Image (cartoon, helix red, strand yellow):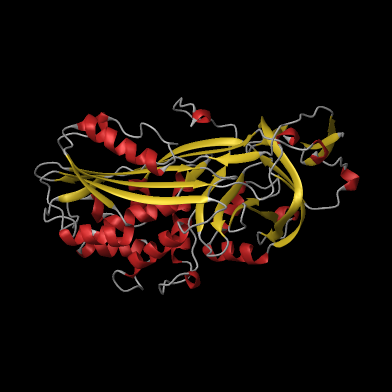
């Protein structure tokens, strides 16, 4: 079958014929890998002490990532609508303010869990700043922890169509006093495993933590920490691991993937592998509020197997920079997208790409108004009776890969030949920067959030993630 693929010239679509097709032996799959790391150092004024919070994420899924957006009616706790969703948008805005022309990738779910555990150990003004910045002021003390517990419990419920695992572990230096109540609450709300270790035996501790991470990420993350990460000043390490694996409900066939031009905001072009399929998806067109022709943008929702989790792509017209849309994003708008898109036939052109990013959470939290936690005035006495503890460092590292794994595909399932005059269905051609999120359609929870400015960006650390 002859296969036509669109290409753009000066903003217009032209359809060119591609003659070569390939046959694969099994149904195609797309994978998403996301690895993350949070490290938090807590220091004592008189004798510096370190508390490290290390968060490891390995995530497979057929799509991109996103952020955390919640609707309270799906949960047992009386949690206000859009509180966590607004927090997630605030984190995104903090990141885009300092990353003008960069990819963005983060998991607010992991960030929220990490800060939730820190909040359990806070008192006084430190606690008030955390609750205010996270949008918890209207809640009774402790209600947010019950909410996070419900969220984790629902997210990790048995589901045959995908795998989602959330796990937490606390490693405490032998002899370092941690409040019994803090340990009790960390276990109650976050199901954290608690282990006593000797951080001066850094190699042994690193081996122990790496084994735990491998066990909770389906062996996708190896050598997560090294002996250099620990020493005599380390008193506590907290690990949060998230693992997700899912397949598209309607899979992209690798024989339909073609090299395609992706136009960046500076109008430069790069060649990328572009996947294609035509099928029924949730789709809608929305206005950015301007009266210009380019003021209409597209929203596409692609479900994973089981229909419970989906990826939502938000794409401006090619002539409109993504920065024009980003200030509009609010929790209420995300809900509007979800409620307004309609199921219809759509032609989808989606890039295959890799993104890796490291985020300084200290800067993000400060930008959200949490400042005392990072100073000598911090009050973490609900965590330990040592009154000199404060947060010294925290960062989040994430890796995302969207690709295809060759498998069997029937010869009759190739692309349908099209021409510009024969376009019968809406086309979503993701050939310029876009915003995306992955959400639970049943609960309203958005698990990941991000944007792609440079789809050709590869892993900078030199790891061979293809072998993970």
In this view, the residue in front, 197 or 444, is: 197
Image location (x, y in percent) of residue 331: 52, 63
Query: Which quadrant of the rendered structure holds the N terminus?
Result: top right
What residue is drawn where x is 59% and y is 45%?
Answer: 63
Q: Is residue 276 left or right of residue 145?
A: right
Image height check: is 205 above or below 194?
A: above
Q: Residue at x 31, y 74 (%)?
A: 140
Horizontally, is 460 left or right of 387 in the view? right
Residue 109 image position (x, y, % from top left): 43, 54
Q: In this view, does 231 lie above or below 41?
A: above
Kindly identify the residue that appears in the image at 84 percent across and 42 percent down: 416
Between 53 and 328, the one nearer to me in the picture? 53
Quarter of the figure with residue 32: top right
Q: Is residue 156 above or below residue 245?
A: below
Q: Which residue is drawn at 36% across and 73% down?
A: 138
x, y percent for residue 132: 33, 65
């Amino acid at each position: 079958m002859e296969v036509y693929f669109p290409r753009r010239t000066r903003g217009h679509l032209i359809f060119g014929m591609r003659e070569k097709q390939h046959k694969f032996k099994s149904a195609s799959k797309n994978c998403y890998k996301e690895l993350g790391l949070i490290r938090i150092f807590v220091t004592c004024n008189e004798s510096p002490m370190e508390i490290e919070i290390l968060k490891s994420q390995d995530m497979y899924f057929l799509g991109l990532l996103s952020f955390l957006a919640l609707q309270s009616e799906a949960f047992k706790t009386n949690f206000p609508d859009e509180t966590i969703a607004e927090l997630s948008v605030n984190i995104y805005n903090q990141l885009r303010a300092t990353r003008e022309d960069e990819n963005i990738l983060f998991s607010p779910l992991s960030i929220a869990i990490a800060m939730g555990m820190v909040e359990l150990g806070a008192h006084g003004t430190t606690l008030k700043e955390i609750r205010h910045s996270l949008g918890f002021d209207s809640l009774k003390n402790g209600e947010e922890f019950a909410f996070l517990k419900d969220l984790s419990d629902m997210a990790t419920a048995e589901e045959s169509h995908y795998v989602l695992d959330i796990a937490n572990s606390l490693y405490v230096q032998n002899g370092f006093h941690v409040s019994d109540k803090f340990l009790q609450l960390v276990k109650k709300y976050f199901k954290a495993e608690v282990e006593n270790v000797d951080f001066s035996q850094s190699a042994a501790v690193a081996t122990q933590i790496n084994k735990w991470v491998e066990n909770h990420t389906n062996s996708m993350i190896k050598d997560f920490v090294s002996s250099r990460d620990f020493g005599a000043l380390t008193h506590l390490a907290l690990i949060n691991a998230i693992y997700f694996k899912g397949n598209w409900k309607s899979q992209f066939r690798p024989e339909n993937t073609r090299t395609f031009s992706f136009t960046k905001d500076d109008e430069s072009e790069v060649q990328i592998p572009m996947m294609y399929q035509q099928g029924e998806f949730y789709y809608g067109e929305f206005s950015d509020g301007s009266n210009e022709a380019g003021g209409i943008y597209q929203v596409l929702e692609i479900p994973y197997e089981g229909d419970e989790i989906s990826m939502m792509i938000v794409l401006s017209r090619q002539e409109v920079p993504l920065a024009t849309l980003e200030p509009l994003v609010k929790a209420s708008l995300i809900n509007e997208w979800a409620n307004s898109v309609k199921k219809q036939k759509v032609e989808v052109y989606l890039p295959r790409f890799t993104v890796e990013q490291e985020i300084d959470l200290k800067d993000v939290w400060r930008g959200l108004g949490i400042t005392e936690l990072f100073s000598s005035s911090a009050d973490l006495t609900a965590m330990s009776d040592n009154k000199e503890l404060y947060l010294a460092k925290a960062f989040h590292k994430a890796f995302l890969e969207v690709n295809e794994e060759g498998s069997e595909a029937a010869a009759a399932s190739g692309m349908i030949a099209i021409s510009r005059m024969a376009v019968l269905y809406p086309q979503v051609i993701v050939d310029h920067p876009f915003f995306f999120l992955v959400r639970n359609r049943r609960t309203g929870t958005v698990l990941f959030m991000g944007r792609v400015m440079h789809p050709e960006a590869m892993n900078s650390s030199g790891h061979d993630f293809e072998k993970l």
